[in-house]
Image (cartoon, rainbow, N blue to C red):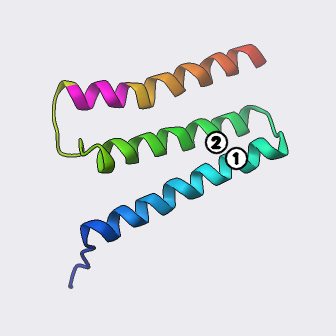
């Protein structure tokens, strides 16, 4: 089975389209003024996905091990997790 490989610029263009799509979806949710636990969860999930893509592909830390990757991923996962936990606990 042959494996399709994308060129570096094609891969970054696809990632850019994904980032723009996620940004437009969150902007549209803001425009509609939707709220609720599921909406906040979706918004924080998009923030996490966007952060992961930026760290891996645009900053170039995908194959880096150690402190810098963990520090960046800590911001991507821990901060949205804290925000979601605070939102969840305030609605209980």
Q: What is the span of residues highlighted in magenta in the rendered image?
A: 68-74
In the rendered image, residue 69 lying in the magenta stretch gets the answer yes
User: Element type at marker 1?
Assistant: helix
Query: Foreground: 38 or 75?
Result: 75
Q: Which one is closest to the eye, mark 1 or mark 2?
A: 1
Point 27% across, 73% down: residue? 6
Q: Quadrant of the N terminus?
A: bottom left
Query: Foreground: 23 or 42?
Result: 23
Q: Is residue 85 above or below residue 77?
A: above
Q: Which mark is residue 42?
A: 2
Tell me if mark 2 has few (under 14), some (14-19) or many (20+) residues whose alpha carbon lies within 10 angstroms of its own. few
Q: Is residue 92 visible?
A: no
User: Element type at marker 2?
Assistant: helix
Tell me if mark 1 has few (under 14), some (14-19) or many (20+) residues whose alpha carbon lies within 10 angstroms of its own. few
Residue 68, position as x, y percentages in the image? 22, 28
Left or right, 63 with respect to 9, comes to left
Point 75% across, 46% down: residue? 29
Q: Quadrant of the C terminus?
A: top right
Which residue is denoted by mark 1 in the rendering?
27
Rounded to the nearest angstrom, the CA distance separating label 1 from label 2 is 12 Å
Point 38% across, 45% down: residue? 54
Tally of marks: 2
Q: Quadrant of residue 71?
A: top left
Q: Main secondary structure of the magenta part?
A: helix
Point 50% across, 62% down: residue? 17
In the rendered image, residue 34 lying in the magenta stretch gets the answer no
């Amino acid at each position: 089975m042959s494996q399709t490989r994308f060129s570096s610029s094609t891969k970054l263009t696809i990632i850019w389209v994904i980032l723009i799509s996620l940004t437009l979806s969150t902007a549209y949710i803001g425009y509609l003024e939707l709220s609720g636990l599921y909406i906040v969860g979706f918004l924080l999930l998009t923030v996490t996905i966007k952060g992961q893509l930026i760290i891996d592909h645009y900053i170039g830390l995908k194959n880096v091990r150690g402190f810098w990757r963990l520090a960046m991923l800590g911001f991507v996962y821990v901060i949205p997790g804290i925000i979601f936990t605070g939102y969840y606990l305030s609605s209980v």
